[in-house]
Image (tube, rainbow, N blue to C red):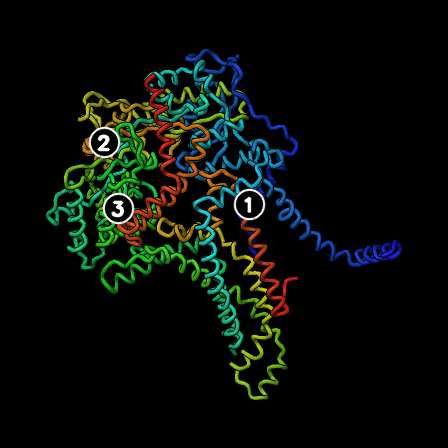
């Protein structure tokens, strides 16, 4: 670009901005938000490479290089927390991903508008239950002595129920399926919206050709929402190493600790919990986690781009 | 979309720090080497009031919901009068962990908001040293030497105390709450429902086999008579005193002290209980209980509130036995409160066995921060709190109103053990009041205070505890660990290993007892894993520190 062209270009941009300034004002807030809450904190990541000392501050604590990364990789917990994180996320992803799609299609296929709205409402309401309450509910319902499950069992069999929590693996199933129960309705909303946008003409044409409703689901509905599905899959895979911290932390107990100690809970324990206080170490682990996530999302995006020509960027 | 919240939070803390301290980059690490210069505003130690001119001290304290108003509290007034100062309060969350976390965050944010002193934030020695090194809390060694009155008295009475509060850099940073209460040293007790024993014609158990027979009878003979096998012979929980259901049994095999992280001494040698074969035997016994359905596996997953619900079950008695300090949640209208009695420590069939024993150790109850303008005055405040008058005030309230001196002929609960009555409480413990601080400030009690309470009949469990204490005292392990002080390097290493040991130990005990892992097959792997974590090196290091301390003691 010559200087004249550049000048013209700049003028054009400025003119555009001036003409549609309202839009840019709207844009301002998200940008400021992201700068303050996403970019600015990134400077703090450097404490992963320093021996953080609150009296000296982030910029004056001594550098220690990769000390804390080495410490993590050599620690006895390392393999265990990474393995647990992967197991839980993969299980969640595989079990959780298809269900909202199936649910959305089921709701979409319903003819009665009122029934449709009612179903949708009922399935997405659990999403608003807070995690603490949800875990409390799980503990109460499945308690063998005072819970719903225990009491019903006692009524029928006249003896104490077996303890469902006594097996470490029961944690996995309870964690994943309670999550599915809670979020399937909410997650299906985006698919339902996508299904509404499927052109009616396609359906009419198929009906004239004598396609059944089920055939139309596979031939029209599913392919039409495929881009949405893929984008969401990419986003989900990008979150593989990010398990919700609160729910796991709340569900941990002595029996399931061997399966339930994951990266985020471990970071909390060595970091800001009262017995931890090792900020640098916690940040190093967190940073490692984020880097793995970043790599995963890039890889999946590439794959999606190759195979389905849909991608995030 | 949820981002990694944890990292974000950590980073936010970082930013907060940047913002608050950006203009104050020269955070100085203060030195304790300055020589002692007395504060001219203070009278000689032992002369009251302490301050010549009235000053203000801000106190950070976890807000106990049972204290109506700290500002107008009788104990506050008592201290203010003795000190000639005004107390202002900065309230912290009432649970210990949240309070500690709050302080941790205040400090990582640069410490601008720290009050002058903290009371009842029981930081570990490790944390205290960490804060002291960075200059956030002040060394009190000079004040101990030159400015103490009641504290001096206490230090003379308790020659071991100095070793337990002096860090390895030679400094003292805290004023302790040192309460020698034998009832709490044997705090973890097994309670059994005696009406069931009577009904089934069984005796109070004395060893593990008898105990097992009783539990079987509880399970099979339907002692609550409702036709449903819903009895839970033995149960515990994951927190509070109820979590010691395993430890109580294990103590029949070897000395168990959770306070010292399961370490014990035998002929001067430090040993970890969880590395011993006796420990394995104990776990095997527990596994048998669990397998037969005598010990509820829910013990590993139930929090104590839930266990209490089960014990309190309004329609039927369900729990045969459980561990607890005292089941005070069985309220006075509940008939069961008279049914549950303490089981003396169980032994093996051959009569060997110990009571679970955790010696009284000083709690880090009081420290002074770098923001304090009158550190010596603040220290004198703690000094007053250590006096017997203040100690009693902080627990029982105002003399003559909330408690009175016993009259001629009134006996203390521990009269049989030779302790004279000292205090006759009037104010009930555990209800909202404005007379004292719920027993949290620095204080010093020797055994005679806690043993000198007159039986008022209102607290049934206290009487039961008093009656059974001797049976526990008889089984006290010959040696015990009070408190070991480590150097920074030792502490770093031990801390890290200990964290991993704790996690692995909890997990392994649960899986051996519930049978997820077979104990015969899994034991060797377990021991190897413990060695991998570094237990042996840790024990060696602890042994060193322990020897160092016992040498100091002899000198």
Q: How far from the left and from the top, in percent, is residue A267?
A: 49, 45
N-terminal-most mark, 2 or 1: 1
Between disc 2 and disc 1, the foreground one is: 2
The quadrant in which the N terminus of chain B is found is bottom right
Between disc 3 and disc 2, the foreground one is: 3
Chain on which label 1 sits: B
N-terminal-most mark, 1 or 3: 1
In the image, taking residue B546 as reference, residue B283 lies left or right, namely left
- Whether residues under marks 2 and 1 lie with C-beta atoms below 8 angstroms apart, the answer is no
Residue shown at 44% from the left, 21% from the top: B170
Callout 2: helix, strand or loop? loop
Residue position marked by numbered label 2 in the rendering: B476
Pick the residue in front: B134 or A12. Answer: B134
Return the mark for residue B9.
Answer: 1
Chain on which label 2 sits: B
- Give the Cα separation between the discs numbered 3 and 2: 21 Å
């Amino acid at each position: 670009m010559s200087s004249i062209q550049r000048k013209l270009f700049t003028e054009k941009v400025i003119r555009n901005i001036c003409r549609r300034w309202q839009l840019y004002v709207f844009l301002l807030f998200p940008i400021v938000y992201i700068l303050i809450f996403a970019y600015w904190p990134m400077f703090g990541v450097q404490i992963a490479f320093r021996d953080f000392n609150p009296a000296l501050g982030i910029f004056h604590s001594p550098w220690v290089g990769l000390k804390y990364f080495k410490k993590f990789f050599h620690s006895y917990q390392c393999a265990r927390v990474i393995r647990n994180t992967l197991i839980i996320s993969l299980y969640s992803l595989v079990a959780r991903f298809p269900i909202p799609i199936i649910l959305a299609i089921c709701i979409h296929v319903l003819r009665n508008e009122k029934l449709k709205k009612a179903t949708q409402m009922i399935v997405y309401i659990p999403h608003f239950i807070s995690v603490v309450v949800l875990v409390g509910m799980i503990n109460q319902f499945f308690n063998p002595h005072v819970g719903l499950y225990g009491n019903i069992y006692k009524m029928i069999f006249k003896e104490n129920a077996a303890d469902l929590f006594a097996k470490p693996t029961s944690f996995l199933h309870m964690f994943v399926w309670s999550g599915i129960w809670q979020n399937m309705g909410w997650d299906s909303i985006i698919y339902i919206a996508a299904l509404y946008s499927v052109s009616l003409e396609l359906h009419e044409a198929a009906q004239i050709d004598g396609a059944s409703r089920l055939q139309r689901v596979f031939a029209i509905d599913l392919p039409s929402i495929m881009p949405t599905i893929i984008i969401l899959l990419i986003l989900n895979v990008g979150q593989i190493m990010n398990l919700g911290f609160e729910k796991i932390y709340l569900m941990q107990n002595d029996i399931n600790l061997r399966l339930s100690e994951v990266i985020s809970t471990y970071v909390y324990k060595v970091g800001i919990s009262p017995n931890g206080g090792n900020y640098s170490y916690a940040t190093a682990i967190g940073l490692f986690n984020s880097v793995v996530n970043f790599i995963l999302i890039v890889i999946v995006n590439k794959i999606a781009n190759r195979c389905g020509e849909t991608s995030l960027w | 979309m949820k981002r990694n919240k944890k990292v974000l939070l950590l980073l936010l803390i970082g930013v907060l720090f940047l913002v608050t301290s950006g203009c104050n980059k020269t955070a100085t690490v203060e030195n304790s080497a300055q020589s002692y210069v007395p504060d001219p505003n203070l009278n000689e130690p032992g002369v009251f009031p302490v301050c010549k001119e009235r000053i203000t001290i801000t106190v950070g304290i976890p807000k106990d919901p049972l204290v109506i108003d700290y500002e107008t509290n009788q104990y506050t007034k008592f201290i203010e009068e003795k000190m000639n100062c005004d107390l202002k309060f900065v309230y912290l969350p009432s649970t210990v962990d949240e309070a500690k976390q709050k302080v941790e965050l205040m400090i990582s944010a640069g410490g601008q908001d720290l009050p002058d002193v903290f009371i009842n934030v029981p930081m570990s020695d490790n944390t205290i040293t960490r804060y002291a090194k960075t200059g956030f809390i002040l060394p009190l060694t000079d004040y101990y030497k030159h400015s103490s009155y009641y504290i001096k008295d206490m230090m003379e009475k308790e020659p071991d105390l100095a070793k337990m509060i002096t860090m390895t850099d030679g400094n003292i940073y805290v004023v302790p709450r040192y309460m020698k209460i034998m009832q709490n040293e044997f705090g973890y007790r097994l309670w059994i429902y005696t009406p069931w024993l009577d009904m089934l014609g069984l005796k109070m158990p004395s060893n593990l086999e008898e105990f097992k027979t009783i539990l079987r009878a509880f399970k099979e003979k339907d002692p609550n008579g409702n036709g449903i096998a819903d009895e839970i012979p033995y149960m515990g929980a994951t927190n509070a005193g109820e979590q010691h259901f395993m430890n109580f049994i294990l103590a029949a095999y070897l000395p168990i002290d959770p306070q010292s992280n399961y370490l014990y001494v035998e002929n001067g040698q430090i040993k970890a209980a969880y590395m011993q074969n006796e420990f394995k035997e104990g776990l095997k016994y527990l596994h048998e209980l669990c397998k037969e359905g005598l010990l509820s596996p829910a013990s590993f997953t139930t929090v104590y509130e839930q266990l209490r619900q089960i014990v309190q079950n309004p329609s039927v008695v369900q729990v045969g036995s459980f561990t607890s300090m005292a089941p005070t949640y069985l309220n006075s209208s509940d008939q069961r409160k008279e049914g549950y009695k303490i089981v003396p420590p169980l032994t093996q069939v051959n009569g060997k066995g110990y009571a679970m024993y955790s010696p009284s150790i000083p709690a880090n109850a009081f420290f002074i921060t770098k923001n304090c303008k009158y550190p010596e005055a603040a220290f004198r405040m703690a000094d007053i709190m250590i006096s017997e008058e203040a100690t009693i005030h902080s627990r029982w309230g105002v003399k003559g109103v909330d408690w009175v001196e016993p009259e001629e002929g009134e006996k203390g609960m521990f009269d049989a053990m030779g302790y004279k009555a000292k205090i006759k409480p009037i104010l009930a413990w555990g209800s909202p009041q404005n007379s004292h601080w719920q027993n949290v400030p620095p204080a010093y009690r020797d055994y005679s205070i806690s043993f000198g309470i007159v039986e008022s009949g209102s607290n049934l469990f206290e009487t039961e505890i008093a009656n059974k204490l001797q049976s526990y005292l008889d089984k006290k392990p010959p040696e015990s660990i009070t408190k070991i002080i480590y150097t920074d390097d030792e502490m770093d290493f031990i801390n890290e290993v200990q964290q991993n040991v704790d996690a692995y130990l909890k997990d392994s005990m649960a899986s051996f007892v519930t049978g997820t892992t077979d104990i015969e097959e899994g034991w060797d792997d377990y021991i190897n894993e413990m060695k991998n974590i570094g237990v042996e090196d840790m024990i060696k290091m602890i042994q060193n520190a322990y020897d160092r301390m016992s040498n100091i003691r002899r000198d």
